[in-house]
Amino acid sequence: MRHQKANSNRPGSGRFSIAALGVLLASACLASLATAADGSEVNRPGGGSNGGNNGGGAADDETVGTLPSSHADGWFDLYRNVLVQRPRMYVEGRLDDIQSSILALRGSNDVLVQDQGSGIARLVFLGDAQVVFDRDMFHLFAFNTGVVVPRPALGSDSILQWGGNSATHQFLSASTYALPIAAMESSGGLDRAPMRFMTSFAGRRTVLGSRADSAFVVLTQTH
C-alpha cells in the first residue's frame, strides 16, 4: 500500500543545537538495546533470486513471522536464516511502510528479516547497499535505524561522527546499537551535515552513512 505524503513539521532553516547533538551522540553510544543479535546470521544462502517482485507487493505485517527461509518481495530478497558475522545496518518498522517509503535501492538487496512482534520487522542489510527513502515518509514513520552487533564483533570499537563532533564506543554485548538518524532527520541535523558511523572488526571496516536533503533520506553501508 502506498501511503499519502504527510505534511511534516520538521524544521527548515532553524538553528540546530550542537549541545543537543552531544546529548544524542552520547545517548546513542551508551545505550545498547536489549534484543540479542547472536545466532541470527549465516553467510548468504546460494540460489536465492536477486531482486524481483513476487507479484504480491510488500508482505502483509501478519506474514512477517512466517516467511520461508528465502523470499523475494518488493525491493528485497528476504532471508530468515542468516548468521550475521560482522556489524550490519538495520532499519526497523512495518515491512510495508519500509517498502513503500523507498525510492531507490542500489547494490545488494539481500536482507535478513527478524520479526519483532506487533507487525514490526527488523531488516538487516547483508551487503553493500545504498537505500534512498522519500523524506516525508521517512519522517512520518520515524524508522528505528542502527547496527546489529553479533558475538564475534564483541570488543570492537566504533566512532560516530557528525559536523566535526564525534563519540566513540566499544561493543561489550551482542545486541542492537541504535543510531539517532530519525532524530537527526527530524531536527534538521542531517541537512546540515551527514552522519557517519565506522567500526572495524577482524581487519575489515564497516561504514554506515546517512544524509538528507529536501526530498530524500539516504542510508549507505559499505565494507
Image: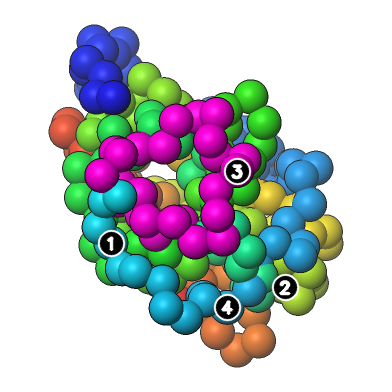
Residue 192 in view, yes or no: no
For the residues labelled 4 and 1, say whether their Cβ atoms are less than 8 Å apart: no
Q: What's the CA distance linking mark 2 and mark 3?
A: 29 Å
Q: Of callouts 1 and 2, which one flags the residue occurring earlier in the amino acid sequence?
A: 1
Does residue 164 appear left or right of residue 20 in this picture?
A: left
Q: Residue at the location (50% across, 29% down)?
A: 61
How packed is label 3: few (under 14 Cα within 10 Å), some, or many (20 or more)? few
Residue type marked 3? Thr
Find residue 140 and name its label: none
Q: Of callouts 2 and 3, which one flags the residue occurring earlier in the amino acid sequence?
A: 3
For the residues labelled 2 and 3, say whether their Cβ atoms are less than 8 Å apart: no
Q: What's the CA distance linking mark 3 and mark 1?
A: 20 Å
Q: What's the CA distance linking mark 4 and mark 1?
A: 18 Å
How packed is label 1: few (under 14 Cα within 10 Å), some, or many (20 or more)? some
Part of the protein shown in magenta:
55-78
The image quadrant of residue 47 is bottom left
For the residues labelled 2 and 4, say whether their Cβ atoms are less than 8 Å apart: no
Residue type marked 1? Gly
